[in-house]
Image (tube, rainbow, N blue to C red):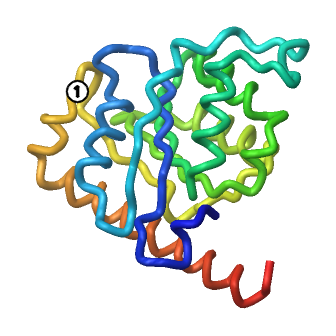
Amino acid sequence: MTVAAGGNLPLQVLCLSGSLRKRSGNTALLRAAAALAPTSLRLTVYEGLGSLPLFNPDDDMANLPSVVAHLRQKVGRCDAMLVACPEYAHGVPGAFKNLLDWLVGSLEFPGKPVALWNASARESHHAQDALRDILLTMAARWIELASVTIPLPGAGCEEADILADAAQRACIQNALSVLAAELRKAERESRNTGS
């Protein structure tokens, strides 16, 4: 974990939306979460998904594309990641899989705590199942209790709509409280074992 861990500073959570849509419910959900975050967490929504070049292992060398290096720096500086990703054709959208591919060979990602939120109001588990498998293969530390479904009414839902809904606000705040508690618990366990 970063230097924030172990002190009174908020834990840094990097929020990754799997959608490129301007009016993405997943992005809106993460922005609402950032607005509702308790003082123990600071959420930052990553905005560079559409700027990442297509992954090519030949480019995954010392001279990384600058946008990829920037992504990896953000991952390295955070204490945890919160992912909200839509499902397309029973799978993970290509742009988000591309982002993950750029992190596979990074030194910053392995062991990083990750929670996955599902914003779909209907049955949408194929991408969630695939993402869980991908993230675990990449050596993420899965935070099961903070991985929840927060169903939104549909496409085009905006941050203000979410914040205006008391039930959704409560669900987000509860999930963030669980995330904060799980991260602090892992931090204490790490200190006690000396790892």
Q: Residues within 10 Å of mark 1 (few under 14, many from 20)?
A: some
Judge from the rendering whether residue 150 lies leftward or rightward of residue 53; answer left or right.
left
The number of callouts visible is: 1
Judge from the rendering whether residue 55 lies leftward or rightward of residue 14; answer left or right.
right
**Of the pair 55 and 88, the residue shown nearer to us:** 55
Measuring 14% from the left and 35% from the top, which residue is drawn there? 161
> Mark 1: which amino acid?
Cys
Q: Say which quarter of the image contains residue 25.
A: top left
Q: Say which quarter of the image contains residue 9.
A: bottom left
Residue 123 place in picture, x, y as percent: 45, 35
From what the image shows, is residue 62 above or below residue 168? above
The quarter of the rendered structure image containing the C terminus is bottom right
**Of the pair 46 and 168, the residue shown nearer to us:** 46
**Of the pair 68 and 149, the residue shown nearer to us:** 68
Q: What residue sits right under mark 1 in the picture?
A: 157
The quarter of the rendered structure image containing the N terminus is bottom right
> What element does badge 1 sit on?
loop
Judge from the rendering whether residue 165 lies leftward or rightward of residue 30; answer left or right.
left
Residue 132 place in picture, x, y as percent: 67, 44
Residue 151 place in picture, x, y as percent: 32, 41
> What is the residue that sits farthest to the bottom in this orientation?
192
From what the image shows, is residue 58 above or below residue 111? above
Measuring 28% from the left and 36% from the top, which residue is drawn there? 152
